[in-house]
Amino acid sequence: MIPMTMIGKVRRMFHRQDKSVREIARLTSLSRNTIRKYLKDEVPQEPKYERGVGATKLTPFHDGLIEALVVDAHRPRKERRRTWTLFEQIRAAGYEGCYSRVTDFIRAWRCAEGKSISTNAFVPLRYELGEAFQFDWSEEGLVIGGMYRKLQVAHTKLCASRAFWLTAYFSQGHEMLFDAHTRAFEALGGVARRGIYDNMKTAVDKVPRKGKGRLVNERFAVMCSHYLFEPDFCNVASGWEYGVVKKMSRCLLMTLYYLSG
């Protein structure tokens, strides 16, 4: 089953970058029939549940391999053990399976933990027109009809022009998240190629300890694929990466007070 993030990437390559089905197949290693299938759907469907893989000969040795990989991750690159060395160690401990299963497990673990992603990556604060927008929530207090209410306000701001759109709700659920994006895109006149987000729970199901790899919420991924933009998430506790959206509170309060009279 192809993850929703890959479907979104395929749709962006076709609709945004004007790549042919043959080029996409070469770049993604997907079959042309599979690519045509997901390009044919106007609204991408959320992937269905897939039963987990059962136990294998390598399962009893997972904990030992993970412990060794964690230790090696803190060593200089030249001092880390090779995959073959780890394979020899678990084989001496009783593993009777093949070498390729060990390599697949180690590769998947490193990808899931973000070990292959450089920790020096950063989000630039200078942008081209149409390159990116930023989205975030804030909690604001406002007197409505003589009663004090707390509102959850969605901020959507274009990174290049600084044009923004605010939408207020009583909660931050998925329905409000999707509605805020729809209203902002309609008001701003289009959709940028990339969206920059904090690690909000309605978009990210799990954040790794290191790196920028994210387990993205499937409903959020469907929305990104539908609007053909690529989501980009900041590192944890790295507010300087987020830039201009965090500075919108004063402008927000002035706007709300103005609208409330």
Image (spheres, grey):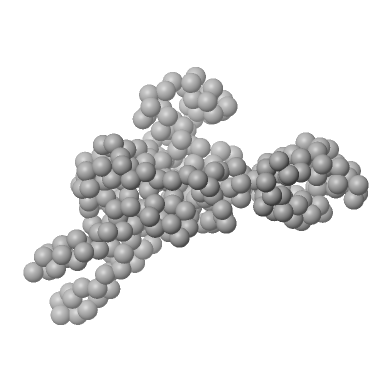
Q: Give the image quarter of residue 252.
A: bottom left
Count the marks: how many?
0
Q: Is residue 203 in view from this perspective?
A: no
Compared across the picture, whether 2 is left or right of 256 comes to right
* Front position in the image: 257 or 236: 236
Quadrant for the C terminus in the image: bottom left
Q: Please give the name of the residue rendered at 26% of the width and 46% of the height, measured from the top-left corner.
A: 158
45 relative to 165, above or below: above
Expressed as whole percent of the image width and height from the top left, the position of residue 232 reads: 42, 46
Q: Please give the name of the residue rendered at 73% of the width and 44% of the height, measured from the top-left corner.
A: 79
170 relative to 94, above or below: below
63 relative to 34, above or below: below
Expressed as whole percent of the image width and height from the top left, the position of residue 172 reads: 36, 63
170 relative to 191, above or below: below
Q: Is residue 236 in view from this perspective?
A: yes
Q: Give the image quarter of residue 227.
A: top left
